Image (spheres, rainbow, N blue to C red):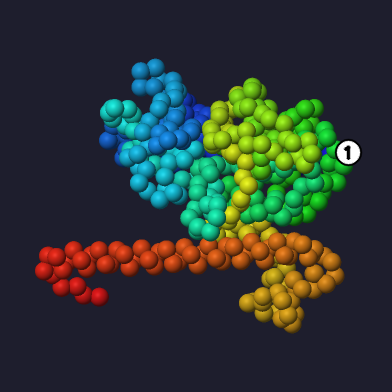
Amino acid sequence: MFNAASVPSSLLTPASSDSSDPLADYGWTDEFAEHFAPLAEAGLVPARIVRVDRGQCDAVLVDPGTGEPRTVRADTRPVGDADMINCPCTGDWAAVDLAAQPMPAVAALLPRSTAIIRKVAGKRSDGQVLAANVDTVLIAASLAAEPDLGRIERFLALAWESGAEPVVVLTKADLVDDAEFIRADVEAIAPGVTVLVVSAETGEGVDVLRACTPGTTAVIGQSGVGKSTLTNVLAGADVMAVQQARAVDQKGRHTTTTRELIPLPGGGVLIDTPGLREVGLYGGEGVAMAFADIEELAEGCRFHDCNHHTEPGCAVQAALADGTLPERRMESYRKLQRESEWIASRSDARLASARVKKWKTITKEMRAMGGTVKW
């Protein structure tokens, strides 16, 4: 059985912060304080965004009068003209102008330490931030139906790319008799990742799960896997509504509709997210980290630019041939690689287009002033 002794120490140690600061339990650290110093001189106050909707947000800050944390409603439009990735999102640390009229307003965002970013649904290549400044990403998968290993691999790539530490949580363990065998299968496709078996019904694994959620934790996964139930268990109260998955196929209903930051009784916060039907990757090193075993095999290939198809001396092909590396995992790796390469190419195209647009604007302005443009 799994025990807390096998949990990596990085998951048990929260980010350093000033415990005397009322915002410390919300994730405020010395690094954020350093970034905020110039904003404080401008009369702004630090706040953590709890929820975003309709051009406004709920944000927790220290009340100047009482010195205690309180939640205010603030306008996000002053920074809302940015692209989707740089718009305010749940988990962001913001500089709030309490004197703004007709309501407090978010004047700026602090640099993010981490960010969970997925590609928006459909054929567009834009990114969407699911949560910011996260220390741990809980990837929830239900044991009530056979876990989709390919989808878990996709979530792992998303989590690794964020810069946070992923943890896979296999929920509803009370509904199956072979939970430990399934956990072993998941561990095989999650190198370097803690995999927990949890039952909210019986309490199995809950204490270990709590030990893995210091600082800021985000819960991601499909609808119906028990994300909101996990949130309620960790919060020690029914803070999120829960619906039953369909009995016929165990597919879930969308219970959570917005991303919301919830304080935990033992310190730290948790961000519950809506179920994700599409998990498009947004490029970066997440795929390489999620498939660290294949990347390690590739180091043994004869050629450093081996494509792992028909090249001689390919260590990856040798592992496929002797069964050490399952064909299913290799196909998943190739698929996610192709997605990441496509996103990278589209990102390069967007940057090139932005540069051309910028120079066209500069050229137009200089010609309007009678100047000469030199390239």
Estimate how packed mark 1 is, as few (under 14), some (14 to 19) or many (20 or more) residues with alpha carbons within 10 Å: few
Residue kind at label 1, given as amino acid type? Asp
Task: Indicate left or right for 162 with 83 as reference.
Answer: right
- Percent across and percent down for residue 143 are 79, 41
As displayed, is residue 194 above or below residue 363?
above
Task: Indicate left or right for 147 with 82 as reference.
Answer: right
Say whether residue 288 is visible.
no
Name the residue: 75% across, 61% down: 329
Name the residue: 58% across, 56% down: 281
**Which image quadrant: the N terminus?**
top right
* Foreground of the two, 364 or 67: 364
As displayed, is residue 356 above or below residue 176?
below
Name the residue: 74% across, 36% down: 246
Q: Furthest-left residue in view?
A: 370
Question: Hey, which quadrant is residue 63 in on the image?
Answer: top left
Task: Indicate left or right for 68 with 117 as reference.
Answer: left
- Percent across and percent down for residue 183 are 80, 46
Task: Indicate left or right for 189 with 12 as reference.
Answer: right
**Which image quadrant: the C terminus?**
bottom left
Say whether residue 241 is visible.
yes
Question: Hey, which quadrant is residue 40 in on the image?
Answer: top left
* Foreground of the two, 69 or 332: 332
Q: Furthest-top residue in view?
A: 66
- Percent across and percent down for residue 228 are 65, 32
Name the residue: 25% across, 63% down: 361
As displayed, is residue 279 above or below residue 316?
above
Secondary structure beneath dot 1 equals loop
Question: Hey, which quadrant is residue 76 in on the image?
Answer: top left
- Percent across and percent down for residue 182 are 82, 46
Residue picked out by circle 1: 177
